[in-house]
Image: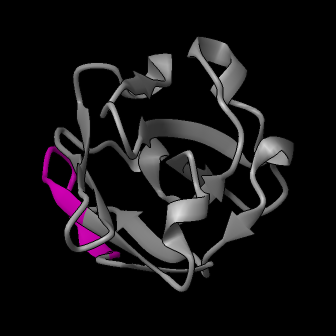
Amino acid sequence: VQLQASGGGPVQPGGSRRLSCVASGRAQLTYAVAWFRQVPGKEREFVAVVTWRSGTKYYADSMEGRATISRDNAGNTVYLQMNGLKPEDTAIYYCAGRRDYCSGRGCYAPSEYTYWGRGTLVTVSS
């Protein structure tokens, strides 16, 4: 399974950004795809996750109400729409796939994800 993230770039505070993650290869092996983000010197942080089959979604508290994760099963694509961006949202955003079932905070640990794409940088600055 290969994951390709895109859509990063500069955005002003309060603005919006839509990230895309295309899964190729044996994408059907994945149970869910999540977005994480990381700032240099800090740990990778969970943002949101969506399951392929049921479309169940979970969000980090920091993004609740400001982010929407969605999937396009036909296109094997997962999107992350972020609104009301703040400078502290500046980070490299990664998409990741996991093979096993998870629920709630059980989906938050990066170590549970097997497949990772290259990140895409989102910079929130005026």
Q: Is residue 84 visible?
A: yes
- To which quarter of the image does residue 100 belong? top right
Query: At which x and y percent is residue 93?
Result: 52, 63
Q: What residue span does the magenta drawing correspond to?
A: 8-18
Q: Is 49 inside the magenta-drawn segment?
A: no
Number of marks: 0
Q: Residue at x 43, y 38 (%)?
A: 51
Q: Nearer the viewer, residue 27 or 121?
A: 27
Residue 121 in the image: above or below residue 108: below
Q: Residue at x 23, y 20 (%)?
A: 65
Q: Is 14 inside the magenta-drawn segment?
A: yes
Query: At which x and y percent is residue 64?
Result: 33, 20
Quadrant occupied by the C terminus: bottom left
Quadrant occupied by the N terminus: bottom right
Q: Residue at x 44, y 47 (%)?
A: 89
Query: At which x and y percent is residue 81?
Result: 21, 50
